[in-house]
Image: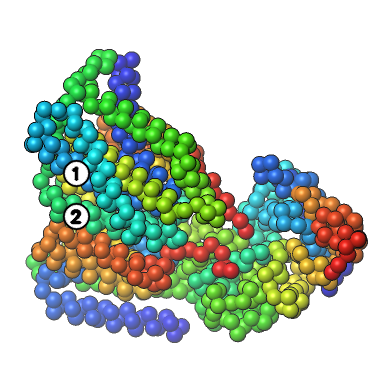
Amino acid sequence: MDLLLVILVDGLIYGAWLFIVSVGLTLVFGVLGILNLAHGSLYAIGAYSTATAVGIYFAYGGDAFPLGSYAVMALAAIIVAVVIAPLLERGLLRHFYHRDEVIGVLVTYGVFLILEDAIKLIWGVDPLFVYEPYDLLGMVEAGPLFYVAYDFLVIAVSAITGFAVWYFLNRTRRGKVMLAVIHDREMSQTMGVNVDKVFLLAFGAGVFLAAFGGALTAPMISVSPGIGVNVIIVAFAVIIIGGLGSIEGAALGAVMVGISRAASVHLMPELELFIIYFVMAVVLIFRPEGIFVRTQTRKI
Amino acid sequence: MSTSNPTGTPALETKGLMKSFGAVTAAHDITVSVPERAVWSLIGTNGAGKTTFVNMVTGYLHPDQGSILFQGRDITSLGPREVTRAGICRSFQIPQLCSELTVLENVLVALAIADPKPPSFFRKARESAAEDRAMEILKRFRIEEHRGRLMSELSAGVRKLLDIAMSMCGHPKVMLLDEPTSGVAAEEKFPIMDLVMEALAAENVTTLFVEHDMDIVTRYSDRVLAFYDGRIIADDAPDEVLNDPQVQRYVTGTAPAEASS
Amino acid sequence: MKAFSDIRVASLLALALLVAGGFALPEWALFLMTIGLAKALVSLGIVVQMRAGLVSFGQGLFFCIGAYVAGLMANFAGLTDIFVLTGIAVIACLAVGGLFGPLLANYRGIFFAMLSLSLSMILYGVLSKMNSLGGTDGLNVAAPTFAGYAPEGRALSLSLYLYTSFIVVAIGAVLRTGFDSQHGLVSLAVRSNELRVEYLGASVRRTNAINYVISAMLGGIGGVITGLAIGHVDPEYAYWTTSGEFVFVAILAGYLSIPAVFVASIILELVRSFSNLYFPNTWQMVLGVFLLVIILTLPNGLGSLFHRKREGGS
């Protein structure tokens, strides 16, 4: 029983993290039709910006109010989104909306290559550490084990993020328009939706979510070159399990992968690295386009 | 135009085909029996179920209920490729061509595939025998002067002809033409139909074609199926069907009072 | 027949040039050419699939299998003969490609790209965890022998280079024939209009599966030679960024010309080695900008060749 609980808690923590890093990817794909291979790099930029910003915060008297560092983290992610999203979307991606989806992959692969080196140029190759926000909340007791409270913060933030995205899409006017675009892009265009605005907004949200994922992760890891390279792969697996473009799918995929991975870590550690692909393969055997499939009509 | 000596087993039979998309009924109890060498036309407004019928017969869609028999053999569950291999070919309302290839290459593709053996990695696609055959086919449809052109350079009529010419490469027993003259300039319609029907008759192909132009329907078909709301509301010789009040009301829109062309 | 002899003439010319170059070039250039040509084979595998409209982001899978064949055989079976190693690599990739090809052939577009990528990442994960195979450090690969001949120093580099040249020219000639074959033409038709191909009676799935298996073998051969030339293999061979570089070369070259793939691959290796010397932290950036420039400035050229028109263009 204890083991089960441990797996569940670990799985939820990891799943929560997975959801945050993948929900932006699936949102951008749903609206723009572009599978953003640079998503991981944006995550990395979020982590680096956070490391820098939080470092500065504590260097200039942040100790007096350490909880403020959480606001700094969110602010760092917002700044990343505001600076980078318009640049990429207006300057580059919008040229490719009418093209094949594979071209989107190639273009964002190019962006990935550029950003990976840009990160090294800006922040250098030595790892950065910002442990303060991680230790700030102390420990909590969960059953037989102690967890760093920050891990539970990740779960809470992830749930809030998911709710916020859901609320935005289903309860606000702009969100409903965006949902309509996800559902049927051509139809929305003919209905007079200003897609330019919707695309920029969606991409901005995607970049923010990627950067925010990085910001949230930065205190838990050593921020070093290459941290984003892996993220895109796991995030992709999560959203393909859920169905490309589906927010609910990303949530379900994240939880499934999170719990499977936790189970593997505790039961069969040697499988840990590819359990995610195993889950993906099993899902795809039964649902070849993921659990929540985007309906595709085709006419002769 | 057609030979009128239907013999033995029907070329194509459908029994009680049902198909719905959500709340929309696209086919309701469609039962037909098409004799060998018949030339039938399918009429009806958009959404009446004509293309759904063509799509079901050619394996693009599968009926919810009912069965489809080709020369007595059940083909209900086959996909487009198997249906084609069995001997039923089709053309498309929007011609389905390989846009990055030339006209000649399109026909070469069709010929390479029509070969009973799978396309070989070691056999040249453009060997002279194959090119000669491709040219023959282009000549039969009078589009040989376009052989080196890409699809974007072709008129609608030429595209239609090429689309049908490619389907003919497999020497089908049954051919379904989905709106062979739609989008074609008015003065080209009859020449195109003449060429197509001549080619089909030469190989004794049983033909069903979807058509909106009633002049073409009367001129080329020996029987007409009128579709409305997923059902066949009339099934008879062209003159009979076109004078049917239901057909005039639901299909041709030529109610007696306002009779026009 | 004329075209056939054209291929022969072109191949002999290319081979003569390569061989002559082998005796003229310094050792570092021989090494660079060997790697460039070997990796070009992997990219050529992507080109084979591109001709039917698919882009694989996971050719690193076969590249890695080929390389590990060289490493494992040398370390655990004492096999160093390059002909045998190449043969084993081809068979291994044939088996793996034959297993996954029919499965992946059901997928298109980004699904195909990303699922093939996932497969190579699985291999990466497995190899990183297998300490008996060196884990993330990988394995050293013994120098190859050539049917009993065991050269060293420059003679080794030259032998490997000449071997690579022969293989590359032979494969180039076979693929040219294949591109012009019925299967090759049907592949182009699949790229343009799958629906039509099925409605003519050919299997799109079969076409894609065959192309995948061909590309698997090419990846394996590229991997075995690269592993032997570098003398070291590690799981990075299967990492997705390695596959990305192969895609880069395939995009740069386009799918119309086989020699262009070799040229593109050698250019990439040149850029890489000079960048490593002079600006080690910006070389990926150079590649990225280059890739974007190609896709942006040639909308009707290389990049737009991926754009699949769904109807006959009405």
Q: Nearer the viewer, residue B61 or C97?
A: B61
Chain where mark 2 sits: A
Work out whether residue C31 can be spotted. yes
- Element type at mark 2: helix
Q: Which of the numbered marks, if any, corresponds to residue A118?
A: 2
Quadrant containing the N terminus of chain A in the rendered view:
top left
Which of the pair A36/C113 is nearer the observer?
A36
Q: Name the residue tied to disc 1.
A: A49
Quote the CA–CA distance across marks 2 and 1: 13 Å
Return the x and y of residue C280 as percentages of the image width and height: 13, 59
User: Residue B18 location in percent, x, y?
Assistant: 74, 45
- Residue B246, quarter of the rendered image: bottom right
Image side of residue A244 versus residue C264, left or right? right
Label 2 vs 1, first from the N-terminus: 1
Residue at 61% from the left image edge and 56% from the top image edge: A299
Q: Is residue A172 above or below residue C214?
A: above
Q: Is residue A272 above or below residue C301?
A: above
Q: Amino acid at mark 1?
A: Ser
Q: Is residue A229 left or right of residue B244?
A: left
